[in-house]
Amino acid sequence: MTPDRRTVLAGLAAGPALAASGLAFAQQLPRIATGTPQAPVEIGFDPEPKGLLDKETIELWPEGRVPGSAGVSVTRKILQRGSPERNDRAVMHVTRPILEVFRPARPNGAAVVILPGGGYVRLAIDKEGAGGGLRMAAAGATAFVLNYRLPGDGWAAGYDAPLQDVQRAVRLVRAQAAEFGVDPARIGVMGFSAGGHLAAASLTRFDDAVYEPLDALDQTSARPDFACLGYAVMAIGPRPGQFQGPLNAAAQPLTERVRAGLAPTFILHAADDRTVPVANSLSMFQALKAADVPVEMHIYQEGGHGFGFSLPPEAPASHWPDAFEAWARKAGIFG
């Protein structure tokens, strides 16, 4: 039985108590309309890993060598949530993980691997994926939107399957940094909601051996050089009988994995988020601060959950990408 988004997020740890979207984003991917959402409509099966905006794509794993794939029989599917004008598509049942590449007109040498959310059930590849790719490219960073595997699809590694993908993605970008025109010491991760949990796992568990090395690429470090955690879940609670794979270390709050020497981190959240309470971000901020890890946090009074890069410009929380960019420039990440 595949869990729904609220079921997955219900087990999160309680813990202690930018978007000026950019001209390119506004032109290519209009913001999601407000109003009552319509039921998702299936718009196609797509077993081939094609880019969803006709973007350059890279397959993450050698053909036939995706870890733990024995017995996985799902087919990749794309859902349109609401009218096509909403630009709010979702991908389900990823079997061949890909990176969608967004190259900037004026590269600043930074790279960011973007991890859309969706409760580990689907991937919000527009408002938290392509929207981020366009916005980061407008800021000069080379962006890679990761279509990662979802744990309910029967992967042997369970919740470590998406971590396998993000570790491999960081290694791939670092190993091919010269080809992409990026600095191998300025490669970060950015994630939202469940994708934020995955980004936090990449930050704190980068040195966990979650899969057997396949090739020389896997000798490259998976450590991100910076992280952006958007309304991120900090732990996934066990739900007996609900998941088709083990929770692995995902059941441990990621705040407990924080230690000195982790990458500088930017955190954003809305105080009125009813899906992932802001206590998650507050607890991570406190843990990073206690470990002397450079961290900046922005909490907005309003914004709800899942806004990504979709808020109208009059919403204060829409300006978080500007705050992130300013932070990244001051830290030397964006040059």
Image (cartoon, grey):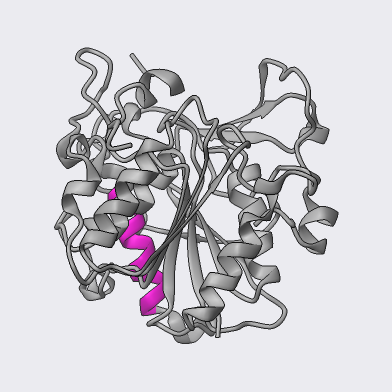
Q: Would you place residue 127 above or below residue 220 in this image? A: above
Residue at position x 32%, y 33% in the image? 151
Q: Position of residue 223 (x, y in %)?
A: 28, 69
The N terminus, quarter of image: top left
Q: Would you place residue 56 above or below residue 33 in this image? A: below
Residue at position x 28%, y 28% in the image? 154
* Residue 64 appears in view: no
The picture quadrant where one finds residue 158 is top left
Residue at position x 31%, y 49% in the image? 284
Q: Main secondary structure of the magenta part?
A: helix
Q: What segment is highlighted magenta in the picture?
A: 163-175
The picture quadrant where one finds residue 183 is bottom left
Q: Position of residue 255 (x, y in %)?
A: 23, 48
Name the residue nearer the viewer: 31 or 290: 290
Q: Would you place residue 103 above or below residue 232 in this image? A: below
Q: Position of residue 246 (x, y in %)?
A: 18, 30
Indicate yes or no whether the magenta region holds residue 169: yes
